[in-house]
Amino acid sequence: MRSLKKKRRIQVLLVAVVALILSTALIGYGLRDGINFFRAPSQLASDPPRAGEVFRLGGLVADGSLVRGQGEVVTFTVTDGNAEVPVRFSGVLPDLFGEGQGMIGTGSMEGDTFIATEILAKHDESYMPKEVVDALKEQGVYVDPKAKPAS
């Protein structure tokens, strides 16, 4: 009698482990296209992405680089202070998008140009995405907009 209980307990445990592994695999399979890694321009220079890899690029829009082309095509340069990446986007930009402002774009590289499929910009005058702030701090060029200037 005791060995039957022990067998049943082991069977239930094995079924639970198999179910956990299967559910983890299914979740990973379902999210495989939804996970986009963040990269700063200097990270692209040191570690280029694989061909066709979709990722997020973030930084500041370089001053004087915003050029509106035919239709909805826009080109600009994203920088983190150490490296610059040219970006091409076809679509409508967010209202608060502008030169000198923080942005994050989702897309992939075509040659040396980042082809963005989505552009996100700050949503108020002091907001900057956390990933962009971290990348700028790492490069030593981040200035906190809330910090009071030294008098």
Image (tube, rainbow, N blue to C red):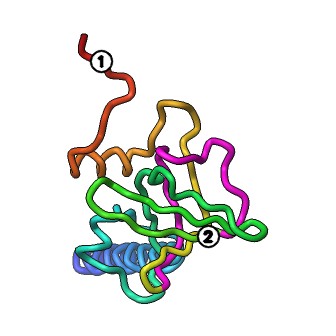
Mark 1 → mark 2, Cα distance in angstroms: 38 Å
Residue for point 48% across, 77% down: 113
* For the residues bearing labels 1 and 2, Cβ distance under 8 angstroms: no
The quadrant of the image that shows the N terminus is bottom left
| Residue 26 visible from this viewpoint | no
Q: Residue furthest right?
A: 71
| Residue 104 visible from this viewpoint | yes
Q: Looking at the image, is 75 positioned above or below residue 60? A: below
**Dot in front, 1 or 2:** 1
On the rendered structure, is 89 left or right of 36?
A: right
Of helix, strand and loop, which one carries label 2?
A: strand
Q: Provide the residue designation for mark 1.
A: 149
Residue 76: x %, y % from top left = 53, 62
On the rendered structure, is 43 left or right of 18?
A: left
Q: Residue furthest front?
A: 64
Q: Earlier in the sequence, mark 1 or mark 2?
A: 2
Q: Nearer the viewer, residue 119 or 151?
A: 151
Residue for point 69% across, 68% down: 69
Q: Looking at the image, is 148 positioned above or below residue 108? A: above
Look at label 1 and name its amino acid.
Answer: Pro
Residue 91 among those drawn in magenta? yes
Exactly how many numbered labels are in the figure? 2
Q: Nearer the viewer, residue 107 or 101?
A: 101
Q: Looking at the image, is 20 positioned above or below residue 80? A: below
Residue range in magenta is: 90-110
Of helix, strand and loop, which one carries label 1?
A: loop
Residue 27 among those drawn in magenta? no
Residue 150: x %, y % from top left = 24, 15
Q: Provide the residue designation for mark 2.
A: 117
